[in-house]
Amino acid sequence: MIKETFYVKYMKRFLDIILSGLALIVLSPVYLVVAILVRIKLGSPVIFIQKRPGKDNKIFNMYKFRTMTDKRDEQGNLLPDDERLTSFGKILRSTSLDELPELWNIFKGDMSIVGPRPQLVKDEWFMSDTEKKRHLVLPGLTGWAQVNGRNAISWEKKFEYDLYYIQNISFLLDVKIILKTVGKVFTKSDISSEGFETAEDYGDYLLRTNKISEAEYNDVLRRN
């Protein structure tokens, strides 16, 4: 399904190492400032770590700057994301500054600069065999789906774009995606799904649109 070109086999990873390494050095002052602000406004820990499925379904720890509080209800359960997302957190997300720590994931080989965005581990239980093919490549900091609607398009469309990408990986396509990503960041477009402060999980989307039953949804949650 993936064309094993010279770029795919050798150059893509080489460029990931060089570009992410340079970015980590050049952006180190930005990291420091953001880290201090997160510590002051949201507390500790500064870095949010979450397990995500990577290439060949290998689970890795993805790093982001924290954007939400740890506010809980009377039973000790975390409040919904939209209640924990602060105005400062919204700024980090709208500028994509929260995703800067993922450059370390790229440098160490968990991710690529361009590829399908890494989803939640539980999302994989909801995916069809065809949709799971997105895990044939390293997940990316940005991808074809992100520059064609990001969180403003349906999950079906996201997966369609992901599969298109892995079938057509090339240097020119990656450059096109990176350039379009820069434009998206500056215009702060397609940050969230319509009616949601944060991106809707795939399982929640399937349940809301009646594509799975509540029993099926809860069964997956129990397994995770």
Image (tube, rainbow, N blue to C red):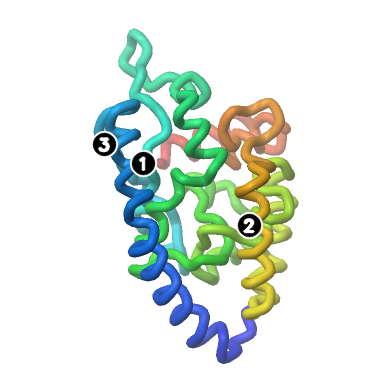
**Residue 34's mark?**
1
Q: Nearer the viewer, mark 1 or mark 2?
A: 1
Dot 1 or dot 3: first in sequence order is 1
**Residue at image point 48% right, 22% down:** 80
- Residue 171: x and y in percent read 63, 80
Type of amino acid at the residue the image marks with label 2:
Thr
**Residue at image point 68% right, 26% down:** 195
Question: Is disc 1 placed on a helix, strand or loop?
Answer: helix
Q: Using the image as rendered, state which of residue 32 and residue 108 is in the foreground.
A: 32
- Residue 191: x and y in percent read 63, 40
Is the C-beta separation of discs 2 and 3 under 8 Å? Answer: no
Q: In the picture provided, is 101 more to the left or to the right than 219?
A: left
The quadrant in which residue 53 appears is bottom left
- Residue 10: x and y in percent read 48, 87
Question: Is residue 1 among what the camera can see?
Answer: no
Dot 2 or dot 3: first in sequence order is 3
Question: Is disc 2 placed on a helix, strand or loop?
Answer: helix
Give the residue at mark 3: 45
Type of amino acid at the residue the image marks with label 3:
Pro
**Residue 181's mark?**
2
